[in-house]
Amino acid sequence: MADDPYAALGLTKSASDAEIKKAYRKIAKTDHPDLNPDPVAVERFRAAAAAYDLLKDPEQRRRFDAGEIDAQGQERPQQRTYREHAEAAGSPYARSYGFDGDPDLSDVFSDLFGHRRTGFSQGGFERRGFQQGGARDGDLRGQDYRFSLQVDFMTAARGGKTRISLPEGGDLEVAIPKGVRDGQTIRLKGKGGPGMGRGGPGDAYLEISVAPHPEFRREGDDIHLTLPITIDEAVLGAKVAAPTIEGAVNLTIPKGASSGQRLRLRGRGINGGDQQVELKIVMPQRIDDELATFMESWRKKNGYDPRSKMKMGG
Amino acid sequence: MTRYYSETEVVTLIDELTPGRLQAYLGAHIVEPVPSEQGPRYREADLARLQLVCHLSECYQLPEDSLNMVMSLIDQLNTARGDMRALIQAVAAEPDEVRVRIHHSLRQIRR
């Protein structure tokens, strides 16, 4: 302990008994070795605890102040830390911390560490599950395999089957679930490496990357598509065939449609999502004289300015 | 060899512990000594646990149900820490190539 027990508590000799208690409590709250593993905190706590042990008894404090005893020999007889017991293998208070229910990791976890009891201790003195149920030596769950798998946009959107080759030879048919997303991982239970002893096989994990599609884009469960239409379809309105992930559907273009206008095909996306169709007016490849002449005369009477509300530069 | 303590010894050894408090902690299953015909027998782990429980209850004035919750969290943390320590030791004993692979995997998963 420091030579000056008052300093260890951040006090001076003039401190009252209440102040001593308060100062110790304050340090103990933050620096107890079971609550704060920082070595500096541990040291601070030990010094404060030893100081408090010396000073909390008024008679002992009087004798120390009078110089009859010194701060030495006042170390706590035995400061037990719970942590070393609780961390130790076979601790009676070992407790599950969240992997038992994990669908992906519980097998690997129990292979390594066995089972512990879960939750709060309210079941009396039961000893269910302490360290038992784990693998015996020689039993080891098989290796997990991880693969990257690129699937095309349509397979990802609609679901489908593909094959992958396995490291130990052979291949495996994989069902791609409908609507799988880019970056998503698919778990194939029991399709990893074989186990040893009584250990079961590992799992295979496929990290999916979805190749882009030339027309469709995916946003959440919605599919986005830019649909080119002709100038006459835009002016007069029309029924046109629009591609969707499940095949073409009829789409009504309203009379006077503009480029950039969005139409929604409800339920034509993925898993209940919609398809959003953005119209894009495409000019004919060649502007013939008839069209040009018509436009000139039309403009004289019907000129309009779609940029009237737009701020021009500067 | 495991040393066991009786209830009387436990109360003597831990300053802040009174027989009444000990009974309350037993009732709340905050501490679970080994039952025997001569009454509950306490291990070193139980002693250390009781000392921490007393500390928490003094410093933070925690009622029994909160104490139980805090101790459950502390147990989860300590068990995880013990497992992690074992895992790190096991990894440390592996040859370089294995450790490099694990290192890369971890970087990937926890990037």
Image (tube, rainbow, N blue to C red):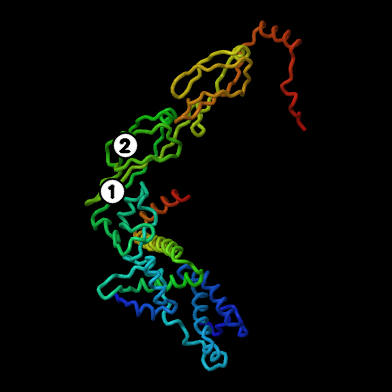
Q: Secondary structure at mark 2?
A: strand
Sequence-wise, which precedes: disc 2 or disc 1?
1
**Residue B20 image point, x, y percent:** 40, 74
Instruction: Name the residue at 50% across, 30% down.
Output: A222
* Image quarter of residue A296: top right
Instruction: Depth check: give the residue in front, A172 or A118.
Output: A118
Q: Determine the residue positioned at 27% across, 39% down.
A: A169
Please count the marks in the image.
2
- Residue at the far top: name it: A290
Q: Quadrant of the N terminus of chain B?
A: bottom left
Where on the picture, by quarter, is residue A182? top left
Q: Which mark is residue A142?
A: 1
Residue type marked 1: Gly
Residue A152 in percent (x, y) is at 42, 30
Chain under callout 2? A
| Observer able to see residue A285 | no
User: Could you tell me if residue A192 is visible in this image?
Assistant: yes
For residue A31, side relative to residue A231 (left or right)? left
- Of the residues shown, which amino acid type is indicated by label 2? Ser
Vertical placement of residue A234 versus A37, above or below: above
Front-most of A68 and A228? A68
Residue A165 - label: 2
Sort mark 1 into few (<14), some (14-19) or many (20+) by Cα contacts within 10 Å: many
